Image (spheres, grey):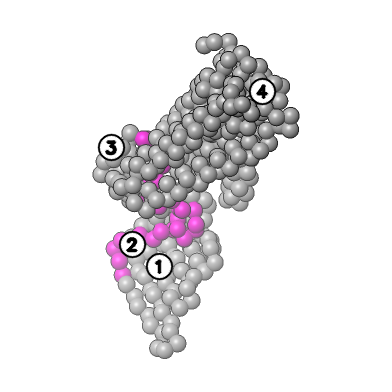
Amino acid sequence: MPRIDRYILSQLLTLFGFFALVLVSVYWINRAVSLFDDLLRDGQTALVVLEFTALTLPLVISVVLPVAAFAATAYGTNRLSGESELVAMQAAGLSPWRMARPVLVFGLFVGLLVAVLVHGLVPMARARLADRQTEIAENVTAQFLRAGSFQYPVDGVTLFIRDIASDGRLLDLFIEDARDPADQTVYTSEEALILRGDSGPVLVLLQGMAQNLQRSDAAPPRLSVTRFQEFSYDIGGMIGGGSRKGRDLRDYGTLQLLNADQQMLQATGADAGQAQREAHERIAQPLLSPIAAMVGFAALLVGGYSRFGVWRQVLFAIVLLIGAQFSTNAAAQQAGRDPALWPILYLPALVGAGICVVLLWWSARPRGPSGKGAA
C-alpha cells in the first residue's frame, strides 16, 4: 500500500477508534441504566447486572460502528481539508477516485467487523441472554415458593404451600386467582411440580380441584367445580418473570436461518420465509458501513476548498446518511410484512453506492471560469 494511503488510513482508524469508543459508551450506559433498574428491582446482584449489560454489548457495537465510521471519515476529511492537505494531494495529481481508495479500504474493514458481530457474536450473545433471562425468571419465581406461609406474588393472587418435599414436590398447594373480580378461581392440589415452559416456569398441579366463581349483573353468581388429575398453571406469566414466548429468530446463526429446519421453526413460531428474511437482513447490514464511510468522504469533496470550511458539505453528508438509514428501515419494514420481498433489503446499499459514485464523479469534474483545470 502506498505511503499516502497508509497515512489516510491511519488517520481514519485513529478517529474511528475514538468515535466508536465514545458512541458505544454513551449507548451502552443508556442500556445499562434501564437493565440496572429492572434487575435490582428483582433482587439480582451487581454481577448479574454486569453480565446482562456485557451480553448486550455486541448488539450495541454492531449498531454504532457504521455511525462511527461516518463520523471518523467526515471529521478526518474536514481536518485534511482545513489543513490544506487535500489541496496538496490534488495538486500532486491525485484525483478524488484515487484519494477514495484508502477510504474504501477503511469502510470495508468496518464492514468486516460488523459482519463478524451480526453473524457470530450477536446471535450467540442474544441466545445466552435469553437463557439467562429464563433462569432469572425461575429464580424470581422460586422466591415466592416458601412453605407454611401465604404469598402474594401479584395483586389478586394468593399462594399457599403446606410443605416442600426433599425431591422438590410441592405438597398441599392452594392458589386463589382473583385478579378479575367477575371471574375468580381457586385451585387446590395434593401435589405440584415446577417445570420449565415456553413462557417461563409452569406449575403442574396433580390430583386437585378448580372452583370457578363467575359474577354477572344480569344473572346470579355461578359456581363450577372441576376435578383434575393433572393441570398446568403458568406461574411465570402470573408473576411477570416469564416474558419470553419461545425462541427468537435473532438467537440463531445465519446459516441456520438460511437452512431453517422444522425444529427451529417450531421453536420460534416463524416460517421459512421469515427466517430467510432475517438472514438476508444480516447479510445486508455490513454493506452500509463502506457506504457510510464513502458518503462522509465524497460529500465533503463536492464543494472544493473554501476558507469558510466545509460545514455545508457536512450537513449534506448527514442528510444523506439519515436518508440511507430511513431507506434501510423502510426496506426492513416492507420485508417484514412480506418475507418474499427480501431482495429489497439490498436496495439501500445499491442506492448508496450509486450516490457515492455520483458524488465522486461530480467532485472530479473540472472547475474554474474557463472550465479547465483539475479540481
Say if the magenta span includes residue 237: yes
Q: Are marks 3 and 1 in contact (CB under 8 Å)?
A: no
Q: CA distance from mark 4 to mark 1?
A: 74 Å
Q: Tell which tag, 3 or 1, sits nearer the viewer.
A: 3
The residue labelled by disc 1 is 187
Q: Is residue 152 left or right of residue 193?
A: right
Q: Are marks 1 and 2 in contact (CB under 8 Å)?
A: yes
The residue labelled by disc 3 is 259
Q: Tell which tag, 2 or 3, sits nearer the viewer.
A: 3
Answer few, some or many: residues within 10 Å of disc 1's Cα (few below 14, many 20 plus, some between 14 and 19). Answer: many
Where is residue 242? Give x, y as percent.
46, 53
The residue labelled by disc 2 is 231
Disc 4, SS: helix
Q: Is residue 197 at all visible to an observer of this figure?
A: no
Of label 3 and label 1, which has the lower sequence position? Answer: 1
The residue labelled by disc 4 is 80
Magenta residue span: 227-254
